[in-house]
Amino acid sequence: MSYDFDTVINRHNTGSLKWDYFKDPDVISMWVADMDFKVASPILEALHKEIDFGVLGYSQPQEKLNELIIERISNNFNWEINKDWIVWLPGLVPALNAACRGVGNDGHKVLTITPIYPPFLTAPRLSRRKREVISLKRNQQKWELDFEEFEKQCADGVKLLLLCNPHNPVGKVYTKDELENIFLICDRYDIVVCSDEIHCDLILNDELNHIPYASIHKNAEKNSITLMAPSKTFNIPGLNCAYAIIPDKEIRDEFNKSKEGIIPYATGLGYSACYAAYKECHAWRQELLVYLNGNLSLLQETVNSLENVSMIPPEATYLAWVNISKLQIENPMETFASYGLGISPGKWFQDKDYIRINFGTSKSQMEKAMDRFRKAVNEI
Ligand SMILES: Cc1ncc(COP(=O)(O)O)c(C=O)c1O
């Protein structure tokens, strides 16, 4: 390996949301979705350059950044986008909320697919919309959407679908067929699709590709809001830099109106880091994916060796969704923390039978965590 993912970096008492959440410093923190790796050198160099310049005023994206995004999306995902469609943002959680406010009116229905990253569940209510949910079904080693049920829900007045592809927390990568089915149904009922694709550069399974929902069909593109960012893949979520791609002017105008005066600009440091990440960190990302697959194998072996837990391996992301229903624990976060493991409880994602484990960490930390997980499952 040319890059260092092995060094354990002590993040305690650094103001880290992930590591300072648990008061016990012995807990290995594997909850919120950031990784424990240092960012790639080109990103650090770009940030040093900004700091050395010394003036940190308001920023806007430079032309070369927009051009890079357009080129990258064309090369990586076969989707041709236009500069005017890009809306820069300080984060994608605000974008989910702006999408809910910008599409439809008070009381209109927003559908999302559970289990799901919690802001998908809160954004509709915060935007005075009615939230509807449909659950993914577990079918052998796959997570699947029941399209009959999906269509029934869509037919009942839904205005906006909040899609997550790749899907956090189950790690599902939607196939072309599935996206086409989603499109056909959403097109039939005139539903706008907000597709959060923040994890699109973290496909772990070589046989799979990320397909942007909007690239499926011209009408899908027209009725879509696609959300992307370098933050998850290159481990820079603290820099607040993300973007929405909104091809239709009317939808874009409404989205922009709903964020006006509330959502700030992205940051200059974020733009610089984004440019460096997309321009110069391709090899780093390739090695990261190999490293994450190593951690995932370790996690899968551990889960397979235990009778009372199970998991469908994620196809993307560095998040694993582990079924612990047989353990019958009331408060999994507290219980696993008492074994020195900090996890996210499934109830946050609307399924209390699961926990989410973030495996974006060094191998030695992962091994230690798996020993603790084994001990916990055997003793509970
Ligand atoms: C699907 C998804 N969307 C959005 C976010 C967070 O986005 P941001 O930090 O840009 O608000 C996450 C973070 O884990 C996520 O998994």
Image: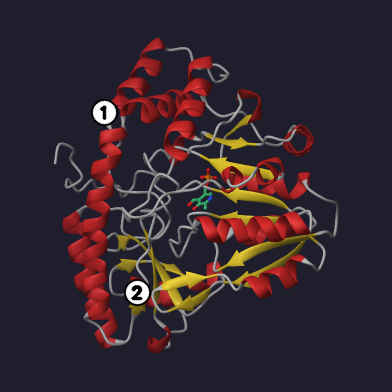
Estimate the x, y position of residue 105 in percent, counting from the top left: 85, 51
- Mark 1 element type: helix
Estimate the x, y position of residue 305 in percent, counting from the top left: 21, 81
Quarter of image, res 75: top left
The quarter of the rendered structure image containing the N terminus is top left
- Please name the residue shown 20% across and 45% down the image: 5
Q: In the figure, is residue 370 to the left or right of 131?
A: left
- Mark 2 element type: helix
| Whether residue 328 is situated above or below residue 110 in the rendered picture | below
Residue sticking out furthest to the right: 106
Residue bearing the label numbered 2: 336
Estimate the x, y position of residue 170 in percent, counting from the top left: 45, 65
The answer to which of 155 and 50 lies nearer the viewer is 155
The answer to which of 251 and 377 lies nearer the viewer is 251
User: Which of the labelled discs sits on residue 212, or is there none?
Assistant: none
User: Which of the labelled discs sits on residue 41, or is there none?
Assistant: 1
Q: In the figure, is residue 280 to the left or right of 132?
A: left
